[in-house]
Image: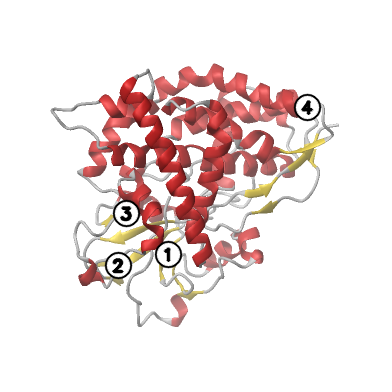
């Protein structure tokens, strides 16, 4: 989830391998696919000037790099700050840094293996499938609440609450806390923008501290009264005397809460937009379980919720002719890989009936999204129930994306159904 930054400038990059696009330019973040198309046609492996590191846009390359153990999400387990020229942590973001210190997303084995093994069983397909009736009920409650209106912002009224409530309940937090959890999460996510301001850092840090205080109170409560929830499981699990610290439990809970809704919210909004703009009759898209699943996968491919995932080179190496030093960053362009014309026929067309469907939206390798089975069920239910209940659904205004590249989601999605 977090961005990692290139530590030392990379020099002597050939001009014909460089590319420029400002991540904060509305023309770019409203439609990054035009930039991706140019790169696919010229240099799918390129040096992005604004980020200062190499990026990979090809599906084959991204898929391979996600699994390549020569790259990792952390670097200080194999090098010192001095060796890398890494600045000291900023004191004013200490709380934010603490939430990420033990994040599954930023750890490498053996620490990653230890934590992931502990929480993985809660997210396996057979377990999350049991949540489908609850998700169906929740989706219909959301639709009931706005069906009498003339129009609604579907992000706020439907896409955001469902996954936030589900993951909160799984962890063991009350459903009514979901709006507050969303607010904290949204403020923290602003830290992953390109060119973060000092004010944004302060705000994200404050949200992080408030989030940790909330989880800390919940931990105290669970130690007194354990329940059948993930928080209690993390606190009471004992693998040969190895127990999680409160910091590890807090970090994991916050990651699951943040990551457990962020991508699903974006994919719900992006997917409804894609379906409505395609002109395809939604009845045909949700005519069976198989077609519903295929429609969800195409939504994930066509307009992915996360467009760049970064890795550190863990040693000096030559990667396909590119000389990388230990600590150099590479950007894996998930959104671009999903539109690679070398992998997909008519890559820029939304086609839920395609036979070459695949995507890297959930990543791959050891950092494959632990919540993918849950997200897929949430998306299948959200789409099918929404279009079943509101078959005349249509866009009420042109959707616009948030200025939070590399996350890719809508500011709002105004729809009507009469």
Pointer 1 or 2: first along the chain: 1
- The residues tagged by marks 1 and 3 sit, at their Cα atoms, a distance apart of 15 Å
Q: Residue at x 35, y 64 (%)?
A: 329
Q: Are marks 4 and 2 in contact (CB under 8 Å)?
A: no
Q: Is residue 375 left or right of residue 291?
A: left
For label 4, the SS is loop
Q: Residue at x 49, y 66 (%)?
A: 198
Q: Residue furthest left?
A: 240
Q: Is residue 112 left or right of residue 372?
A: left
Q: Is residue 82 left or right of residue 348?
A: left
- The residues tagged by marks 1 and 4 sit, at their Cα atoms, a distance apart of 44 Å
* Residue 365 position within the rendered picture, expressed as x and y whole percent measured from the top left: 32, 44
Pointer 2 or 3: first along the chain: 3
Q: Kindly indicate the quadrant of the structure image that contains residue 93.
A: bottom left
Report the mark closest to the observer, 1 or 4. Answer: 4
Pointer 4 or 3: first along the chain: 3
Q: Are marks 1 and 4 in contact (CB under 8 Å)?
A: no
Pointer 1 or 3: first along the chain: 1
At label 3, counting other C-alpha atoms closer than 10 Å, the crowd grade (few under 14, some 14-19, many 20 or more) is: many
Report the mark closest to the observer, 1 or 3. Answer: 3
- Residue 88: mark: 2
- Residue 130: mark: none
* Residue 300 position within the rendered picture, expressed as x and y whole percent measured from the top left: 55, 42
- Quadrant position of the C terminus in the picture: top right
Would residue 351 be visible to someone looking at this image?
A: no
Q: Are marks 4 and 3 in contact (CB under 8 Å)?
A: no
Q: Which residue is mark 4?
A: 147
For label 2, the SS is loop
At label 2, counting other C-alpha atoms closer than 10 Å, the crowd grade (few under 14, some 14-19, many 20 or more) is: few
Would residue 245 be visible to someone looking at this image?
A: yes
Pointer 4 or 2: first along the chain: 2
């Amino acid at each position: 989830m977090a961005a990692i930054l290139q530590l030392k400038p990379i020099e002597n990059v050939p001009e014909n391998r460089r590319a420029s696009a400002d991540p904060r330019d509305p023309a770019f973040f409203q439609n990054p696919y035009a930039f991706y198309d140019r790169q696919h046609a010229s240099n799918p492996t390129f040096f992005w000037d604004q980020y200062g590191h190499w990026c990979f846009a090809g599906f084959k390359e991204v898929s391979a790099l996600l699994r390549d153990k020569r790259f990792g999400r952390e670097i200080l387990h194999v090098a010192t700050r001095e060796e890398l020229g890494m600045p000291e942590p900023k004191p004013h973001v200490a709380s934010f840094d603490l939430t990420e210190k033990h994040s599954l997303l930023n750890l490498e084995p053996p620490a990653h293996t230890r934590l992931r093994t502990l929480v993985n069983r809660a997210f396996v397909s057979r377990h999350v499938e049991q949540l489908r009736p609850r998700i169906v009920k929740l989706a219909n409650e959301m639709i009931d609440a706005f069906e009498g209106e003339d129009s609604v912002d579907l992000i706020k009224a439907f896409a955001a609450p469902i996954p936030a409530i589900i993951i909160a309940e799984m962890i063991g937090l009350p459903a009514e806390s979901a709006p507050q959890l969303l607010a904290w999460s949204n403020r923290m996510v602003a830290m992953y923008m390109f060119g973060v301001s000092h004010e944004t850092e302060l705000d994200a840090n404050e949200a992080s501290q408030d989030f940790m205080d909330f989880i800390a109170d919940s931990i105290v409560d669970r130690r007194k009264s354990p329940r059948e929830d993930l928080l209690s499981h993390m606190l009471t699990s004992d693998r040969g005397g190895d127990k999680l610290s409160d910091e590890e439990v807090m970090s994991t809970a916050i990651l699951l809460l943040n990551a457990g809704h962020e991508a699903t919210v974006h994919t719900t909004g992006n997917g409804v937009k894609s379906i409505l703009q395609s002109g395809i009759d939604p009845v045909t898209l949700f005519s069976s379980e198989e077609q519903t699943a295929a429609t969800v996968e195409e939504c994930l491919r066509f307009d992915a919720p996360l467009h760049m995932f970064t890795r550190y080179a863990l040693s000096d190496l030559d990667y396909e002719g590119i000389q990388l030093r230990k600590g150099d960053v590479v950007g894996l362009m998930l959104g671009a890989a999903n539109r690679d014309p070398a992998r997909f026929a008519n890559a820029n067309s939304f086609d839920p009936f395609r036979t070459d469907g695949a995507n890297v939206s959930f990543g791959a390798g050891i950092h494959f999204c632990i919540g993918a089975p849950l997200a897929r069920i949430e998306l299948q239910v959200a789409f099918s129930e929404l279009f079943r209940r509101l078959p005349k659904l249509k866009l009420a205004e042109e959707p616009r994306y948030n200025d939070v590249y590399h996350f890719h989601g809508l500011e709002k999605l105004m729809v009507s159904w009469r």
